[in-house]
Image: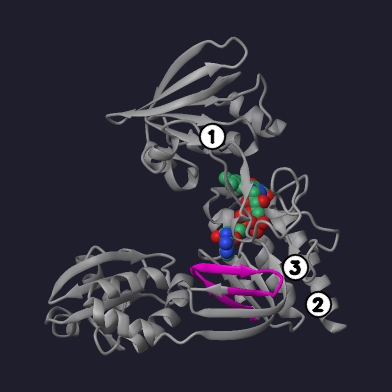
């Protein structure tokens, strides 16, 4: 692997051959997550592809001339020409491999693949999921000198990474941007010493034999497993919804509200998240219409009062969307009043859906006892029905799902696990 500056770019990158370039920065958690993957793949592909690193902060003009504005960004060249995908953010090993393989003949890819040696590592505890619950478990475990690995399919932070502002996490007088709170939690646990394996593909989770396979070659064994994979937004499951996801329909106001400056937006839902996010979207949009299936909002009183007082926000009660269709830049929403059966249609530039969450349990369904909604049942130590398997945070069957309840779960599981390991 070669570290170069803008002066050597022409010679080392544009002058022919197959080259992969990583534009990185310091104090950049996704760059740190990428570094070992990049190094490891250099060992495998290094004879065929040149691996190059460029420090973005000191080569800013070059980066900007290539339209690179974030770190890390990985780009691929063949004979001086840009090819393949432009990878950025939490870059997975599988994404790098896909693009490297595309540079090589099939036969050579087969030869390289046979060289991938399976790796097995041993830990006391594996934490699956790096949201507030998993990060807190990791913090308590490392402070107790328990050897723990934290695995996440994305970068750590969980749902709060894409929450606009958090005003109810104790210790912060001013509301905190969600991504900052996520960053503080993640750095605290990492600096403490919990080993991060993030932005990975999780191929298999064996709860009975206590191992997790990541990136298809690394097996992580542990004495205990803490499940902290959280929850994801629920779909309405009406025609047009999946097709228009990311193309007019969004589940994340922090990510997408900025695209609707002076536009008309529909928000579906009436709970805390829907109402608080509608208030945020209204900072950008010309008008926000909230469609809710009941005749009253379910959000807390403070959120309701704020929304009712906002002149940009309108309400359509007792109504559910039945179908979404895009025509030009507009989204047409067919609606039905669930009391009268009356059909209607609303038109907007964008739609945000906040109708609850579902637990992320796809990888270990079947072995665990769950409630009727699929959330994992635990005892008060966070222990599930399986020996040595704990569940914490939003994935757990409980009444209230908040950051504070997630960190509390993580604390309890970590202390229980530490006590159990001490008596081994
Ligand atoms: C829009 C919005 C606003 C919110 N606002 C607030 C608020 O103001 N205050 C408050 O207290 N709460 C708020 N919440 C709720 C809060 O974010 C959650 O209760 C909290 O994040 C739950 O933490 P968790 O660690 O259990 O799960 P999550 O935050 O969901 O984290 C789970 C992690 O697991 C990872 N993961 C998923 N599947 C796998 C897998 N198979 N293998 C490995 N890793 C996996 C995910 O990538 C993620 O990083 C809000 C939620 C949303 C959606």
Estimate the x, y position of residue 324 in percent, counting from the top left: 42, 28
Q: Quadrant of ligand 1?
A: bottom right
Q: Are marks 1 and 2 in contact (CB under 8 Å)?
A: no
| Lateral position of residue 398 relative to residue 27, left or right | right
Question: In the image, 307: left or right of 375?
Answer: left
User: Could you tell me which residue is drawn at 73 percent across and 76 percent down?
Assistant: 141
Q: Is residue 180 visible?
A: no
- The answer to whether the beta carbon of the residue marked 1 is less than 8 Å from any atom of ligand 1 is no
Specify the quadrant of the image occupied by residue 34. Answer: bottom left
Q: Earlier in the sequence, mark 1 or mark 2?
A: 1
Q: Nearer the viewer, residue 322 or 392?
A: 322
Residue picked out by circle 2 = 418
Which numbered circle lies on residue 236? 1
Q: Point out the stretch of residues depicted in magenta.
A: 193-212
Q: Identify whether 87 is placed above or below 328.
A: below
In the figure, 304 relative to 151: above or below?
above
- Tell me which corner region of the image, top left, top right, bottom left or bottom right, holds residue 301: top right
Q: Magenta stretch: residue 197 in it? A: yes
Instruction: Identify the residue position indicated by label 3 in the image.
Output: 389
- The image quadrant that residue 85 belongs to is bottom left
């Amino acid at each position: 692997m070669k570290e170069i500056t803008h002066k050597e770019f022409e010679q080392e990158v544009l002058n022919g051959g197959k080259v992969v370039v990583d534009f990185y920065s310091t104090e950049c958690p996704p760059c740190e997550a990428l570094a070992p993957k990049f190094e490891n793949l250099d060992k495998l592909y290094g004879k065929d592809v040149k691996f190059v690193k460029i420090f973005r902060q000191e080569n800013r003009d070059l980066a900007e001339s290539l339209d690179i504005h974030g770190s890390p960004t990985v780009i691929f060249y063949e004979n001086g020409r840009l090819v393949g995908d432009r990878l950025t953010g939490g870059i997975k090993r599988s994404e790098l491999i896909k693009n490297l393989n595309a540079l090589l003949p099939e036969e050579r890819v087969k030869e390289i693949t046979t060289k991938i040696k399976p790796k097995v590592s041993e830990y006391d505890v594996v934490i699956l999921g790096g949201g507030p619950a998993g990060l807190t478990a990791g913090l308590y475990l490392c402070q107790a000198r328990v050897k723990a690995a934290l695995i996440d399919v994305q970068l750590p932070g969980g749902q709060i990474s894409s929450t606009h502002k958090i005003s109810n996490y104790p210790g912060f007088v001013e509301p905190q941007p969600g991504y900052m709170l996520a960053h503080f939690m993640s750095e605290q646990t990492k600096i403490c010493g919990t080993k991060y394996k993030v932005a990975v593909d999780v191929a298999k989770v064996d709860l009975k034999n206590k191992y997790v396979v990541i990136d298809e070659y690394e097996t992580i064994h542990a004495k205990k497993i803490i499940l902290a994979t959280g929850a994801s937004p629920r779909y309405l499951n009406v025609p047009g919804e999946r097709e228009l996801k990311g193309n007019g329909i969004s589940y994340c106001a922090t990510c997408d509200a900025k695209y609707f400056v002076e536009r008309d937006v529909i928000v579906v839902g009436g709970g805390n998240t829907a109402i608080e996010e509608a208030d945020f979207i209204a900072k950008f949009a010309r008008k926000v219409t909230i469609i809710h299936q009941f005749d009253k909002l379910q959000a807390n009183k403070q959120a309701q009062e704020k929304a009712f007082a906002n002149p940009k926000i309108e309400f359509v009660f007792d109504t559910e969307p039945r179908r979404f269709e895009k025509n030009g830049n507009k989204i047409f929403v067919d609606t039905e009043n669930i009391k009268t059966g009356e059909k209607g249609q609303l038109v907007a530039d964008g739609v945000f859906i906040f109708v609850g969450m579902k637990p992320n349990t796809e990888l270990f369904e079947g072995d665990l006892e769950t409630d009727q909604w699929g959330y994992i049942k635990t005892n008060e130590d966070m222990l599930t029905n399986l020996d040595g398997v704990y569940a914490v945070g939003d994935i757990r069957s409980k009444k209230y799902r908040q950051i504070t309840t997630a960190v509390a779960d993580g604390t309890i599981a970590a202390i229980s696990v530490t006590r159990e390991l001490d008596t081994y």
